[in-house]
Image (spheres, helix red, strand yellow):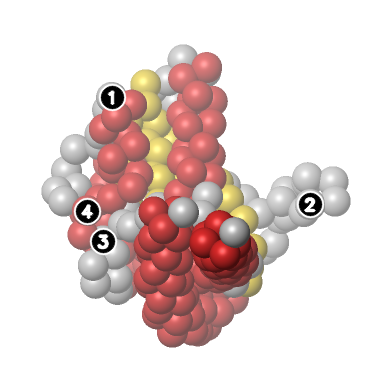
């Protein structure tokens, strides 16, 4: 019985240590989530509006002017999969990778070759295990993008993606990531990045046609503003994924802490029962010995 009590005590100590770790990780994620949430909530309205406007502008251009809206036969597709660098965030990374694999399967079913650009160590590790073909020209961006997430880093990656599309290195680009809704909810999202598609209304899926007045001129908009908008779109996806990661980790660590608390309570009950049984057994042995001596 003493051996059983020792084992239970060791388990109680182990669970208490685990609770301290998960509770600390929850608090760290909560602090990081607040900063990440502020960043994406400030960025999202601008990014979504400028994306919708410029997609329509680009779609109204002819093939020689609309270099980013030039829809052609998809021989090679690029799938950008955004995940996190670290785990312990529930099903966050798995959900993002499932969506990426679905996008890859869709392109392959249409007869296209697929190359991947993982942004986040977990996506990189998953694609390495799957034996996927990696897009060239991005260096170690997949491993370092979240080390110091900023607009300059996203701009460099987006510029390389745009250059590859213009040079016909790939004919279509899609991004998969988890969109931040709140701390408990992350929405796996798949977006067409290139070519730029015109805005459609969700009710009847019809294209919205708007007549714009261009100032200073159309050529300058195409050369400067469209690339800037595409860089902003990628940066928004990275910020979304970053906030969603911290929300998922905070929720996962909260659940882990609660589960550890429930397990700790059960272990303490088990320990008290075993200890009481041990004491009762000792008392019975003493009484039995006393009676034997008295007899």
Task: Look at 52% across and 18% down and name the residue there.
Answer: 110
Q: Which of the marked residues, 1 or 2, is nearer the chain's N terminus?
A: 1
Q: Which of the marked residues, 4 or 1, is nearer the chain's N terminus?
A: 1
Q: Which of the marked residues, 3 or 2, is nearer the chain's N terminus?
A: 3
Q: Is 166 left or right of 91, judged from the image as shown?
A: left
Q: Is 198 left or right of 257, judged from the image as shown?
A: right
Task: Look at 29% across and 29% down and name the residue there.
Answer: 129
Secondary element at tag 3 = loop
Say if 257 sits above or below 59 in the image.
below
Distance (Cα) linking label 1 and label 2: 37 Å
Distance (Cα) linking label 3 and label 2: 33 Å
Q: Is 268 left or right of 75, judged from the image as shown?
A: right
Residue 66 or residue 128, whichever sits in front = 128
Instruction: Identify the mark at residue 131; answer none if there is no mark.
Output: 1
Spot occupied by residue 64 in the image (x, y as percentages of width and height)? 40, 43
Instruction: Identify the mark at residue 145; answer none if there is no mark.
Output: 3
Q: Check disc 1: other Cα within 10 Å, few if <14, some if 14-19, many if 20+.
A: few
């Amino acid at each position: 019985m003493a051996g059983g009590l020792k084992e239970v005590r060791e388990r109680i100590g182990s669970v208490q240590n685990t609770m301290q770790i998960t509770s600390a990780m929850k608090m760290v994620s909560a602090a990081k989530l607040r900063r990440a949430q502020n960043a994406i909530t400030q960025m999202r309205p601008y990014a979504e509006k400028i994306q919708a406007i410029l997609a329509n502008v680009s779609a109204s251009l002819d093939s020689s002017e609309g270099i980013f809206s030039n829809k052609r036969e998809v021989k090679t597709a690029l799938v950008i999969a955004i995940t996190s660098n670290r785990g312990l965030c529930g099903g966050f990374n798995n959900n993002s990778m499932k969506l990426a694999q679905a996008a890859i399967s869709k392109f392959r079913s249409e007869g296209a070759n697929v190359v991947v650009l993982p942004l986040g160590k977990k996506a990189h590790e998953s694609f390495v295990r799957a034996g996927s073909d990696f897009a060239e020209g991005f260096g170690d961006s997949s491993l370092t993008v979240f080390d110091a997430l900023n607009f300059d880093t996203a701009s460099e990656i987006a510029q390389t993606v745009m250059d590859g599309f213009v040079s016909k290195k790939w004919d279509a680009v899609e991004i998969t990531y988890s969109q931040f809704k709140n701390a408990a909810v992350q929405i796996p999202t798949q977006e067409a990045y290139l070519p730029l598609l015109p805005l459609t209304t969700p009710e009847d899926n019809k294209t919205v046609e708007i007549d714009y007045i261009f100032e200073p001129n159309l050529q300058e908009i195409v050369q400067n503003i469209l690339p800037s908008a595409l860089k902003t779109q990628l940066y928004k996806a990275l910020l979304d994924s970053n906030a969603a990661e911290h929300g998922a980790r905070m929720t996962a660590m909260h659940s882990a802490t609660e589960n550890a608390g429930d397990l700790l309570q059960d272990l303490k009950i088990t320990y008290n029962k075993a200890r009481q049984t041990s004491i009762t057994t000792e008392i019975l042995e003493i009484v039995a010995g006393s009676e034997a001596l008295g007899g």
